[in-house]
Amino acid sequence: MNPLPRILLAEDSSEDAELVLEALAEYRIANTVLHVKDGEEALDYLYRRGAFANYPPIQPAVVLLDLKMPKVDGTEVIKQLKNDPELKRIPVVVMTSSREERDLVNSYNLGANAYVVKPLNFHEFVDAVKQLGAFWAVLNERPPEPARQPKI
C-alpha cells in the first residue's frame, strides 16, 4: 500500500503553523504534515536537497504556502514549482495575511490553485484550515505522478 502523501506547510510564523497543525489533527487528516519555516526549505524538500535528500520521492498532496517568508518568499516558490515539469501539478494553496490585490493576482498568474486570506479570528482560522485539509488531502483526486527523469 502506498503511503499517504505529505502536506507541505511552508510557514514562518510558529503560531500560525501550530494552529494549522492543530486544526488538521482535530479534523483527523491522516496525512503527515511537514512544516518548513521558509521558502528555501520548501524548495529543498521539493527537490530533495540538503536535509531532505534522503526523503522518498513522493510529491506532497498539497503545498500550504505563506507568501511573506524569509530567504525565499512564497512567490518564488510558486514560480519554481509551476515551471518544473515534474512538480507543476502539485496543488499550491497560498495562505497569507495579505489582502493586496497584486499578491492575489500574481499568485494566480504564477499558477497557485487557491488563495486564502488567513482569518484573524481563531475559530475561523481553524475552520478554514480544516476545510482546506479535507479538500486537498482527502477529496481532491490527484493525477498520477510523472515518471522521474534521470538528471544529467
Image: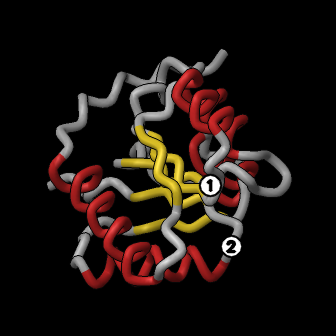
Please name whichever residue, 120 or 31, is drawn nearer the observer in this view of the structure. 120
Q: Secondary structure at mark 2?
A: loop
> Image quadrant for the C terminus?
top right
Q: Could you tell me which residue is drawn at 15 percent across and 50 percent down?
A: 139
User: What percent of the width, then of the height, locates residue 62?
Assistant: 40, 48
User: What percent of the width, then of the height, locates residue 143?
Assistant: 24, 29
4 left or right of 57 in image: left
Please name whichever residue, 147 or 138, is drawn nearer the observer in this view of the structure. 138
Badge 2 local density, few (<14 within 10 Å), some, or many (20+)? few
Q: Secondary structure at mark 1?
A: loop
Q: Earlier in the sequence, mark 2 or mark 1?
A: 2
Q: Could you tell me which residue is drawn at 75 percent across and 49 percent down?
A: 40
> Image quadrant for the N terminus?
bottom left
104 left or right of 40 in image: left
Return the residue at label 1.
Answer: 66
User: What percent of the width, then of the height, locates residue 90?
Assistant: 41, 36
On the question of residue 21 being in view, the answer is yes
Disc 2/disc 1 C-alpha distance (Å): 9 Å
Return the residue at label 2.
Answer: 13
Q: Could you tell me which residue is drawn at 68 percent across and 73 percent down?
A: 13
User: What percent of the width, then of the height, locates residue 88?
Assistant: 47, 26
Q: Amino acid at mark 1?
A: Asp
Decide: marks 2, 1 in contact (CB < 8 A)? yes
Q: Could you tell me which residue is drawn at 62 percent across and 82 percent down?
A: 15
* Number of residue marks: 2
